[in-house]
Amino acid sequence: MIPCYQTTTRFIPARYQAALLLEYTRSQDLDDQALFQGTHLDATAMVSEQSLLTPGEYLQLLHNLNQALPSRDTSFMLGQQLLPGHLGNLSHALLQARNLRQALDILICYQAWLSPLLAPHLMTLGDKTALYWTDSCVTPRLRGFVVEMMMTAVSGMSRWLSGMRLPWQYRFNRTQPAYIEQYAVHLGTETRFNDYFDAMLIDAEWLDQPWPRGNEMTVTLALAAVEQHAPAEFCRQSLLAALYDYLAARIRLAPTLERTSADFGCSPATFKRHLAQHHTHFQAELDLARAHVTLNMINNQGYSNEQIAAYLGFHDANNFRRSFKRWTGLTPSMLRAHLLDSRVLE
C-alpha cells in the first residue's frame, strides 16, 4: 500500500498556513469572519499547536480571502510571506540551506508541510532546471491563484537567501490573465503563458552557487529533528503526487487502473472515487505522466517520434502523435520548435 494524504486528511498546522492568512486578512482591515466563512474555524484555532487543517479547509480559507479582496495581488502578497515560513526546524533548515539545490530538495521532500496543495518536481531541460508543479489538493478554480502564490514563495525565498534576484523564467499552463502587470511587479518580465506546464526555469549553474547563510551541519541537525518529531502516520505526498511518481516510474509497463489501485491498497471503484474527489480521473493522470516523460525524452535525449512511441507502448508513431496532441495541445514537432524557439530567444 502506498501511503498518501487526500483533501480530507487532517495534518496541516493551523498556526502556519492559516495563521498567515488570518494575519493578512487583518492587515487588509477585513473582519475575521470574511476568512472563516463556511468553515468551523476561528481565530483561536489559528494559534493552537494542536489545531490541524485538512487541505480542503485550507483551500476554503484561500477561496474566502480571494473573494473578500478585490485586489489582483493577493496571491503574490501571500506568497512573499510563505517561505521559509514559521515551521520550526523545517523552516530553520531552509534558512540555512547551502544553495538553491538543497533548498529545492527540502521543498520537494517536505512538500506536505511546505506545499500541501501543489506538488513540486524537478526536471532537467538541456542546460536549465525546471521546478514544475502538478496538482495535490487544489481545485481547478483556485489553481491559478495557488500557482502564483507558490512561484512567488520560491522566488522570494531564493532571492532572500541568495542575496540577489535569481534569473528565473516563468511558464504558465493558462491563458494570459488581465492583471499581467502584477506578474511583472512580483515575478519579473520573463513570463510565458499558454505553455505545456506550470514551471520555473533557471540555468543549472545557479543550483550550486553557495548562499551566504548556508550551513550544512545546521541543516542536517534541523532535518533530523523534523524526522524525529514527525507523526508516525505522516504522509509525505498527496494521492495525486504519489500517483504521478508511480505512473512516471512505470510508464513503460502500461499501468492499468486495476494494478495501480491494488498497489494503492483499494479497489478500482474506490480509487476512481478518490480521484473524482480531486477533480480528475485515472486516464488524465496517466496522460500527464506520459506527456512529461515525452518532454524529457525530446528535450534531453533527442528521441524521434518512433522511439518515443515504442518506449510508451504505442503501436506506431502516428498514434503517439495524435495522443500527444490530445495531452498538450501541441504535436511533437510543435514542441520541438517551441523548445528551439525558447533557446534562440535567450
Image (cartoon, rainbow, N blue to C red):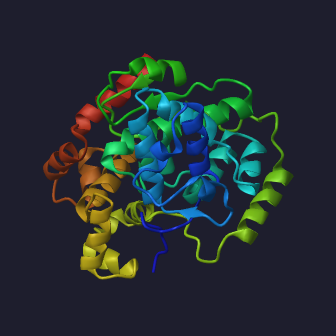
Q: Give the quarter of the figure containing the N terminus.
A: bottom left
Task: Name which residue lies at 43% across and 17% down.
Answer: 181
Residue 286 visible to an observer of this rendering: yes
Task: Name which residue lies at 23% across and 61% down.
Answer: 283
Residue 128 visible to an observer of this rendering: no
Q: Position of residue 238 (x, y in %)?
A: 46, 63
Numbered disc total: 0
Q: Position of residue 79 (x, y in %)?
A: 56, 37
* Quadrant hosting residue 46: bottom right
Q: Is residue 219 above or below residue 128?
A: below
Q: Position of residue 288 (x, y in %)?
A: 31, 53
In the image shown, does 345 or 81 lie closer to the viewer?
81
Q: Is residue 311 left or right of residue 112?
A: left
Q: Is residue 161 left or right of residue 39?
A: right
Task: Name which residue lies at 31% across and 78% down.
Answer: 259
Q: Is residue 285 left or right of residue 2?
A: left
Task: Name which residue lies at 42% across and 44% down.
Answer: 64
Q: Position of residue 8 (x, y in %)?
A: 43, 67
Q: Is residue 306 left or right of residue 120?
A: left
Q: Is residue 193 above or below residue 41?
A: above
In the image shown, does 70 or 125 lie closer to the viewer?
70
* Quadrant hosting residue 199: top left
